[in-house]
Each structure stands twice: as structure tokens, then as C-alpha cells.
Image (cartoon, rainbow, N blue to C red):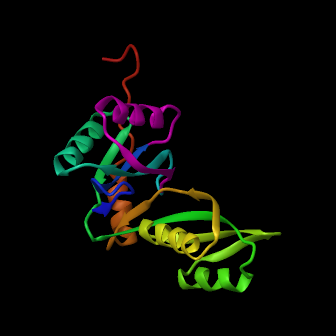
Amino acid sequence: MIATTNGSREGHTITALVEDKPGVLNRITSMFRRRGYNIASLAVGPSEVPRLSRMTFVVEGDPHTLEQVAKNLNKLIDVIKVVDISDDNSVSRELALIRVRWGDQTLSEIKTIVDIFGAKIVDTAPHSLIVEVTGKSNKVDDLVENLTGIGFHVQEVMRTGMVAMSRGLSGSDVSRRTQTALPRPKWESGSV
């Protein structure tokens, strides 16, 4: 469970293995919209299995809401597997690029703050630079807060959304788990 940006509700992390084909993201997000669930974060990318993608959601709500989200996701034909990985037995990260404008401050002052957070400067221009930071969502929030708190102007923040994975699965466990999670066969017209 994580804190969400508005601080009023709990955030739960769910991963879903889905078919990698057009329209799947739309069907899933439409289900969230119809049911009134709020997605605090969404990241999608190819999985280790051909023709399947993995989605990571951070969903706001209480445990009952989380249970309803999982049930509704499992009803969708394109969804192969849904896993709640909200507990502490998972690794989660977010990537952010932060454009910082600087004037009176020196580059060394910015570098000091960036180094404290384990971030790095990936681009510089006259009077602005781009910082890359990877970590938990609160680390990204704290870096932005610290930069603005000491007088730097944060012009733009681009965040990937959280990606997460359960701890402790070996490579053989992963391949065994996904072998049973291949796309379900579709009925062809005219077949009985």
C-alpha cells in the first residue's frame, strides 16, 4: 500500500497480464471510468511472454474497492491474470524527468541536491537543465520539493508512473507462471 498524491485515500498496486493487441488499454480504462475507480498511476509495456503486455496500476480506495477492481479486471476477456502486489513484498519504481530553471544559483548547488537524491543531470542548456531521478514516488516528490524549497524554479515534471514487481520469484518460477497464462483460445465462427 502506498500514499497517493492527494493524501486522502490509500493507493494499492495491481499488475495485470493482458493481451497485446489494439483496444485493450481502452477497454480496461473504460471499465475504470464506468465503475468510478480512480487510477493514480498507470504504466504499460511488453512482458516476458510474446503477445502479452504487463500493466501496473496504482488504484485509490479501500480494500473493498481494490477487491472490486480485481474482480472487474478478471471479467475482461483480454485480461489473463491480475495480481495485487500492494504489500511490502514487492519492488516499485518510478522514473521522472525534471526541468529546472536556474539563475543566481550555481550548477554546483543544483548538483549537490541532485547527488543527495541519487539522481543525475542528463541535459543542460543556458539557465536550465533536466534531472533524471528513479525511485519510489515519494522520492520524486521530495526532490521536486527540495529543489523548489531552496529557490530553483521547476518548469516541468514528466513522470512514467509506477512499475512494480513481486519479490522472490526465480527465473524458473516466472516461466512456469507465465506458461499457464497464455491467451485463451478464441472461438471461431462456425465452430461448435
Residue 77 appears in view? no
Determine whether 94 is above or below 51 in the image.
below
Identify the residue at horizontal 35%, vertical 32% (top origin).
31
Which residue is the extreme one toward the left?
Answer: 64
Q: Is residue 20 left or right of residue 80?
A: right
Give the x, y percent position of residue 7.
32, 58
Total count of labels:
0
**157 relative position to 189: left or right:** right
Q: Residue at horizontal 20%, vertical 46%?
A: 67
Q: Is residue 56 left or right of residue 147?
A: left
How far from the left and from the top, in percent, is residue 28?
39, 36
Quarter-of-image position of residue 39: top left
Q: Residue 100 at x, y = what percent?
A: 67, 67
Q: Which segment is the magenta one?
A: 19-47
Check the image and report above or below for 11 versus 27.
below
Residue with the most extreme right position = 126
> Taking 81 as reference, is 21 above or below it?
above
